[in-house]
Amino acid sequence: MIPRGGMGNLMKQAQKMQEQMLKMQQELEAREVNASSGGGMVEAVVNGKGELLRLKLDPEVVDPEDVEMLCDLVVAAVGEAQRRAQEMTQEEMGKLTGGMNIPGLT
């Protein structure tokens, strides 16, 4: 049995945590994460949602004779940046939730 007033306090705490999580999600979405491949010749920058914001290519990596290599480097850099963004989001949300795994947060 929940003590009198206990349910109201529990609801207030849940609401406060939800507000904190929303604020943190917005802050994380605004952060930028970068990764590179090809020894830094290709750099990808994504936001906290994993959306590609910028892509930088060193002119030396642009070889019309080897477009496939350039594509591989772009995919590698973007994939790594997205992985880092997801890792950052999980880490920050874990701090807020005390390590509880709450479905749908990330």
Image: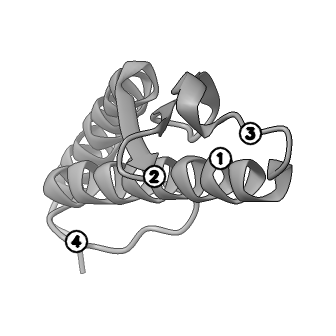
Q: Inspect the image, locate mark 2, and give the three-letter code of the amino acid beneath it.
A: Ser
> What residue sits 38% from the left and 54% below the top?
84
Q: Which sits earlier in the primary sequence, circle 1 or circle 3? A: 3
Mark 3 crowd level (few <14, some 14–19, many ≥20, 10 Å Cα): few
What residue did someone put label 2 on? 37
Residue 46 image point, x, y percent:
51, 32
Report how far apart the C-alphas of labels 3 and 4 lie in the structure: 69 Å
What residue did someone put label 4 on? 2
What residue did someone put label 3 on? 63
Label 4 secondary element: loop
Q: Are marks 2 and 1 in contact (CB under 8 Å)?
A: yes
Location of residue 95 with respect to 49 vertically, above or below: below
Q: Which sits earlier in the primary sequence, circle 2 or circle 1? A: 2
Q: Are marks 3 and 4 in contact (CB under 8 Å)?
A: no
> What residue sits 57% from the left and 41% below the top?
50
Q: Which sits earlier in the primary sequence, circle 4 or circle 1? A: 4
Label 3 secondary element: loop
Report how far apart the C-alphas of labels 3 and 2 lie in the structure: 16 Å
Residue 53 image point, x, y percent:
59, 21
